Amino acid sequence: MIRTLPNSKSYLSGFRFFTLLYFVFLFAPLVVIMVLAFNDSMFPSLPWKGFTLDWFFGEGPEKIGIFYDKMNLRSIATSFKVAISVSILSTVVGTMAAFLFEQEDFKFKGTLYFLMVAPLVIPGVILGISILLFSTTVGLFFENTFGIDIKILMPGFWLIVFGQFSFITTIVTIVISARLRKFDRTLEEAASNLGANRFAVIWFITLQYLKPSIIGGAAIAFLLSFENFNTTTFLISSRPTLPIILYQQVRDGSTPVINAISFILIVSVSIIAVANLYYRNKEKN
């Protein structure tokens, strides 16, 4: 739709209908899930059998709410721990990588950038299998050769963190690099001329300018890690993350507690998105 050109009424009506249809297709499943979280039924689907809060606060034995479901609460806690670890590592390394790629005299910038972007074009399933086989091979080598059992190479928390870190860092780097390219280097020169050392210039000038993109990159890393399924599937141990648990419950049959979990996640993400939007608008003003 070109706003500067005149458009017929039929075209405008069709455009509005398409926009409405698009948003209905996008949000209708989410609304249905949120409504069914309060359905007084033993199945996470229609028909509607009345309103209840048991799938949030039910203590059992028939209806166990999410706040009393130890298995789901454990998986949520695991997902939070993994997501926080991945977001911290990805933000720190992504920020340093963004500075590195902005160096004009860096000889291997093209090669390193290609290697950094490569995990993004590799399917998550292949990436997860590759990381699992590599870590298993290295772990067996150290165990058979030196008798050392390296726990970090076994399927579990840290292998999940490093598996997700391998591709999420690339996304964070791209986000921060996009803003760093717009940075006015004369601000750093002015601060240096006024007596600031290199550390002070980066801390008080450059990083302050990059703060919105760093926060945004960390938020993206957290969300991507929290919902990751393909790569994480091959790296889990006895304590899986929330997406894995939800998949198992949907596959084997579950109660509307999965709708209650979805309701909490949708509301939480919406609040974070609104807060982030408010923060950005406040920064612009």
Image (cartoon, rainbow, N blue to C red):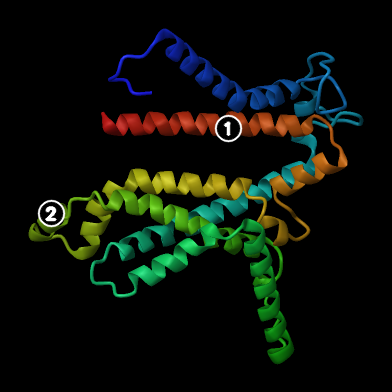
- Residue drawn 52% across and 29% down? 271
Lower position in the chain sequence, tag 2 or tag 1: 2
Task: Indicate the quadrant where residue 100 lies.
Answer: bottom left
x, y (%) of residue 186?
Answer: 13, 54
Q: Secondary structure at mark 2?
A: helix
Task: Looking at the picture, tell me which residue is in the foreground, 12 or 70.
Answer: 12
Between marks 2 and 1 in the image, the one whose residue lies nearer the viewer: 2
Residue 251, above or below 136: above
At label 1, the amino acid type is Ser
Residue projecting furthest to the bottom: 145
x, y (%) of residue 183?
Answer: 22, 50
- Residue drawn 12% across and 60% down? 192
Task: Looking at the picture, tell me which residue is in the foreground, 3 or 245.
Answer: 3
**Residue 282 horizontal side relative to residue 59, left or right:** left
| Disc 2 target residue | 186
Marking on residue 268: 1
Q: CA distance from mark 2 to mark 1?
A: 41 Å
Task: Looking at the picture, tell me which residue is in the foreground, 136 or 151.
Answer: 136
Residue 160, above or below 9: below
